[in-house]
Image (spheres, rainbow, N blue to C red):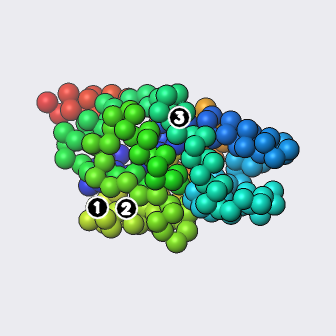
Amino acid sequence: MLNEIKAVIFDLDGTLVDSMWMWKAIDIEFLGNYGFDCPPELQREIEGMSFSETAVYFKERFNLKESLDEIKEIWTEMSIEKYRNEVPLKRGVKDFLEFLRVKNIPAGIATSNGRAMVEAVLESLNISKYFKKVTTACEVASGKPAPDIYLKVANDLGIAPENCLVFEDVPAGILAGKRAGMRVCAIDDDFSREIEAEKRSLSDWFIHDYYDILDRNEEIEEYDA
């Protein structure tokens, strides 16, 4: 998987941190405050959208009177405390990031989230130091599944797309990485387990956690020795 890879780019929610449960809970609470039930198809419809694109979707679909900035501010306030206190790293993340650091492979983040939320979770989990570039989809023209955000991170890292490896947890993100000309590894997540077959079909690799890679690499190094 890591052959010819010169940079690794991660999605955030569901990929680095176990947080997809949180966003469904926030959507249910947010819409409930306006008297709406959360539509069962909502999460799939907003999958990959940038923070700003999602605000537009909610405002138009549910005819909200709040401005886009007000909607985003409400979501930020609702999420930051959870990010700081309730969201853990996915299994093996810290060890894999340390492995990349030792191997001098730079890492970046390409997330659909807002900047304040990203900074909150990275700081609370003490992993900011591992990333040379953190980009949100609000900084590019289109969110996932468009390739824009992955191309921007690769360009900012100074690495050709074909030498980048992407980690993603949902189909829209996997497609974004593939459309950017990168290799993509899908990762298991409770939130998207029912569409695992789709994730496997779209990606180059599938892992249950980051120890799948670390353990395999250790076996190879022992064999070479």
Amino acid on which the number 3 mark rests in the picture:
Glu
Asked if marks 1 and 2 touch (Cβ < 8 Å), the reply is: yes
Mark 1 and mark 2: Cα distance apart in space = 6 Å
State left or right for residue 131 relative to residue 206.
left
The quadrant holding residue 37 is top right
Which mark identifies residue 182?
Answer: none
Precedes in sequence: disc 2 or disc 3: 3
**In the image, 79: left or right of 182?**
right
Mark 3 in CB contact with mark 1 (< 8 angstroms): no
Q: Amino acid at mark 1?
A: Leu
Q: Which residue is mark 1?
A: 157
Q: Residues within 10 Å of mark 3 (few under 14, many from 20)?
A: some
Q: Which mark is residue 153?
A: 2
Q: Quadrant of residue 70?
A: bottom right
- Other-residue count near label 2 (Cα within 10 Å), few / some / many at <14 / 14–19 / ≥20: many
225 with respect to 4 (left or right)? left
